[in-house]
Structure formats: C-alpha cells, structure tokens
Image (cartoon, grey):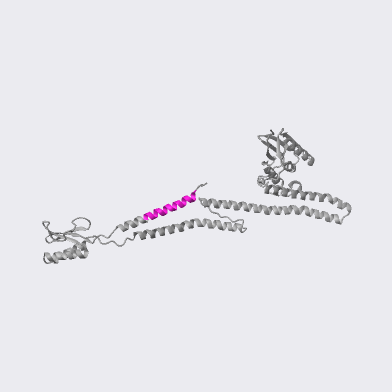
Amino acid sequence: MFHGGRLVLRIYGIGLAQIAALAATLAIAREAGRRSPPPHAAQTRFLVEEIVSHASGRDALQARLDELERRTGIEVVLEDGSGNRVAGSASARRHGPGTFTTRWASGTAWIFAPPPPRPPNATPLFAIAAVLVLVGISAVLTASWLARPLAALSAAARELGAGKLWARAKLRRGDELGDVAIAFDEMAERIEHLVRGQRELLANVSHELRTPLARIRVALDLAAEGSAQEAAAQLSGIAGDLAELERLTDDILTSARLELSSAQPPLRLQRTPAAEMVEEAALRFRSSHPGTALRVENGCGGAQIEVDGMMLRRALDNLLSNAAKHGGAAEVELIASAAGGLLTIEVRDHGPGIAPEDMEHLFTPFFRGDRSRARQTGGLGLGLLLTRRILEAHRGTLEIESKLGHGTTARIQVPLAALAP
C-alpha cells in the first residue's frame, strides 16, 4: 500500500515547474514573433514629396507614381483641395494600417505603405530548443538530487559488507530516501551490536572454560606428584570443576537451541498441576540451600499448565538460586497465584538489590553484577538469559524489579492450560 509519497510529491513539483517554465518561454517566443518592425513613415513621406516636387506635368507624375508602386508596393493618391483625384493609384486604400497623409502643392497626398515582409518564423525552432534545454537542466538537477543520497547509501552498504561495522549513511532528509537511510543506520547499529555480542560471548566462554580446566590440570599434577591419599583428596575438587564445565556447556547449548528454534521451540509439553510444580521447586531449594529460609505462598489451587516440566523447573531453580546467592541471610519468598488465565510466580529476596546501571545488562551473557566474578556469588552469568528464553519458548514473560537496599523481585508468567471438557 502507498504511504507518504513525499518523494513523489517533490518529483511532481519539479514536473510542474518544468511545465510552467516551458509555457512562459513559449509565450515570450510567440509574442516576439507577432511583433514586426513598423513602416518607415518619415522616409516614405520624404520620397513621395520628392517625386511630386520634381515631376513635370500630370502624365509624368502619374508615371513616376506607377513606377513607385511597382517597385516598392507603396500606393499614392494625390487630391486637390476639393478632394478630386489628380494622380496616383485608383485602388489605393484611404484608411487602415499603413495609411498616412502629407501635403503637396495642390492639396493632400494619401499614402499607403504596406508593412515590410516578415522574416521566416523561428518560433517552432526556438520552442524545441527551449524544451530541450529546460528538460536537460531539470533532468540533471533531479538526477543529482536523487543520486547523492543513493551514492551515500551504496558506499555505506559496501563498507558494512567489508566488515566496517561503524559505517553509517548519516543522511537526514524529509522524504522516503531519508527514511531508508535511517532504517539502514538502525540496521547497521543492530548488526554491530550483534557481532560485538558474539565476540564478547566467545571471549567469555573461553574464559569460563579455561578457568576450571586450569584447576583440573593443577589438581591432576598435584595428584600425580603426591601419595594416594593426596590424589584421593583432589578428586572432589576435580569432580566439582567437571560439574561446573558440564553445567556451563549445558546452559550454553540450551540457550542456543532455544534461540535458534524460536519458531518451533524444542519443548516436550505435558499438562502439569501448577501447585505441584511450585511445591517441588520449594523442596529442591530447601535441599540445596539448607541455610536459607524459604517462605512459600502457593495460591495456584487446581490450576494446570501445559509446559516442558524439566525446562520450567530449571527456570525456577535459577531464580531461587539467584535469590539465595544475593539475598544474604534474609529469607527468600516464593509466591504463586493463578488468575486471568496466567500462572504468576514471584521470587523475592531482601538483599542489597541491583544497581540501576546494571539493570539493562541483566540478560547479557556472562554479565554479573559482582565485578570480582566470584564463584560463590557471581555464578556463570547465563541463568537469567536462559530463564528468559525458557519463558519465551512457553509464550510467557520474565520481569525483574529491584531497588537498592530493598532487594529484588523476579516475576514470571505463563499461560494456564485450557480447561478439560
């Protein structure tokens, strides 16, 4: 469907200006062609007076006047004081353009001098030349007006394709070409962000993999150099590092699978009682975090959800684990309710909260508010990203609210299953 049309209106205005300029040029040319040089009355009067004054007799005068008419087309009638013709052309005009009078010795001389012949009419040739010149000038100006932004867009696209992620068109116009340039710059900005994100992801994955691998190598070297008891003592550390590697690899693969399969998420959906899932999440939390108090409000009633149980359990465990790590010694709250066709689960902690400048980076892979990247508090920086992708795969949402000094609330919502007939 056609929208806007600002560029079309400008081109239409150029066309109207061409037509107006051409019409004005043709009008000037036509007016100039209509004008002809006026007859030379003074010279004609002088010539007639000379002929009349030097003629001897009426017959000689008539002969001279006839010769003047034959050679120049000027007709003369001589009248006496009573208005009677004395000599001259019998068919001469007495009135009309080109007619004037002069005095002679016996009365009045009527003179009719036809206008001189016009030169060949040059109006058509002039009009054609004017059309060609005007169209040529307007075509050059219009082409230049359109070519400059297109050339800028083309150059920016080539630079972006060559790997210069900072390339931008930087065109500011009030028409469709300006809209295209703004859309191109926005696309280039997103591409630059995505590419940099992938590079940062690769660097962070390398760092996270290198750290436990280095610890495993050190533990193996110590076990090889020591006794059997020392080797056995290193096994628990190696097992923990291997578990961390396995968890990291699993989180990365799961997140990538959910992102690449957004059209058809790889879920195994089954109908599950919502209250049962909340209670199981509470049991797992108390088992893995015995030193942290947990308060549960399970208001789901008999509501059911159709979800991938393993995936959603993983999302809940991530949120509860984050609350335990960042909530300090205060208790963690798990509040669930079912209303309006949605299951809403809130996980609250009463820790220091999240700094406002860190809120926009919460879902960035490997980002952690703890700049020291401590294993005890920092985690791997993939939990919230993975949780959000799990919720999006279930057509749900994840919201994070935090206030410094008052703790953080993570709220998830998923659609309830339709009631069985």
Q: Is residue 366 above or below residue 35?
A: above
Where is residue 227 drawn, in percent x and y?
88, 54
Q: Nearer the viewer, residue 210 or 73?
A: 73
Q: Is residue 102 above or below residue 306?
A: below
Q: Viewed as shown, does residue 97 lie left or right of 131?
A: left
Q: Nearer the viewer, residue 403 or 153?
A: 153
Q: Viewed as shown, does residue 310 lie left or right of 101?
A: right
Residue 29 found in image quarter? bottom left
Q: Nearer the viewer, residue 270 or 315?
A: 270
- The reply to whether residue 48 is visible in this rendering is yes
Where is residue 136 drawn, in percent x and y?
43, 59
Assign the C terminus to one quadrant of the image: top right
Pick out the residue farthest to the right. Answer: 228
Residue 20 inside the magenta-drawn segment: yes
Q: Residue at x 80, y 53 (%)?
A: 216
Residue 253 inside the magenta-drawn segment: no
Q: Residue at x 34, y 56 (%)?
A: 28
Q: Is residue 57 above or below residue 94?
A: below
Q: Viewed as shown, does residue 352 lie left or right of 40?
A: right
Where is residue 348 drawn, in percent x and y?
71, 39
Where is residue 13 drawn, in percent x and y?
44, 51
Q: Most prominent secondary structure in the magenta stretch?
A: helix
Q: Residue at x 50, y 55 (%)?
A: 146
**Span colored in magenta:** 5-24
